[in-house]
Image (cartoon, helix red, strand yellow):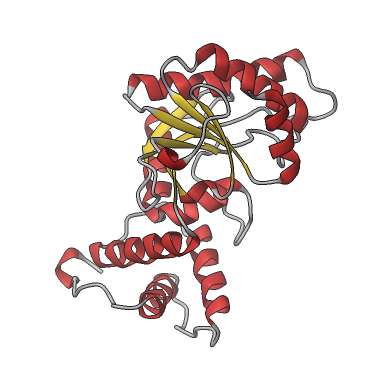
Amino acid sequence: MSAGEFRGIPATQEERRAFLLRALLAERGEAPDLPADQDGQRRLLRALMNVRPPRPAGEEFLAVQDAYLRAETAAKGITDLAGLTPAEPGIYLWQGDITTLRCGAIVNAANSGLTGCYIPGHNCIDNCIHTYAGVQLRLHCARLMAEQGHEEPTGRAKLTPAYALPCDYVLHTVGPIVSGGVTGEDRALLASCYRSCLELARRNGIGSVAFCCISTGVFHFPPALAAEIAVDTVRRHRGETEVIFNVFRDEDYALYRALLG
């Protein structure tokens, strides 16, 4: 799949998906046996992308992948920041799939390796963002980590392109992992995640940032306390940057709704 092999993009999503599946299976030395049903094919494609190591892909593969992912995201429905109503000046609350949000940057709650979640089909935000951005994002993050020479510290942030996502950039931050009670250090590190993302966005001229609920999933930070820290930190440090608090669960929406406005 070198640049010289480029033959154009298949016309339909079914053809694109079959092309990507066969390419990924061939890359692994496996037979191109595809599930008969479309849902099975979608699950297999996501699983193969999730476990693929960070390495380059050919021009033809990337062109087909990007066309496929953008069409899948469009089918889910893209939400534009311009169509949202602020909960208070410069701050928005939106419930939905962060990979469908068109804004300056979305925030990924990453792990310290920064190259995404390798569990096939896992529903964490890290897995979702890497899946719908495309394989280029994992490679980009791997190169950043190779240059850095060590794991990403908690409370810091890295900036990457968004590739096939509708936003412009992805901000990757590693939140604190809570074991037992929340410590003062846990609070400070979570606030640092929000502050670091805002500072990095400001330095790069990014006008809007969508934050997920950092550390509240498998990292076990209590959601109510995390929301309080997030809102307080954003109010103190957002400057001219517009901020969207993105939530997925009804419970989180209620927490932020009570804190905003």
The reply to whether residue 190 is in sight is no
Tell me: residue 198, above or below residue 223: above
The reply to whether residue 35 is in sight is yes
Residue 128 relative to residue 183: left or right: left
Query: Which residue is found at the position 73% from the left and 32% from the top?
Result: 255
- Comparing 104 with 179, the one in front is 104
Q: Position of residue 24 (x, y in %)?
A: 42, 70
Q: Position of residue 236 (x, y in %)?
A: 55, 11
User: Which of the 4 quarters of the picture holds residue 147?
Assistant: top left
Residue 253 relative to residue 59: left or right: right
Q: Position of residue 196 (x, y in %)?
A: 49, 20
Tell me: residue 234, above or below residue 14: above
User: Which of the 4 quarters of the picture holds residue 206?
Assistant: top left
Query: Which residue is found at the position 44% from the left and 53% from the top?
Result: 78
Q: Residue furthest bottom?
A: 36
Tell me: residue 216, above or below residue 119: above
Looking at the rendered structure, the number of numbered marks drawn on it comes to 0
Residue 180 relative to residue 106: left or right: right
Q: Residue furthest right?
A: 180
Tell me: residue 150, above or below residue 20: above
Query: Which residue is found at the position 67% from the left and 27% from the top?
Result: 176
Specify the quadrant that holds the C terminus: top right
Specify the quadrant that holds the N terminus: bottom left
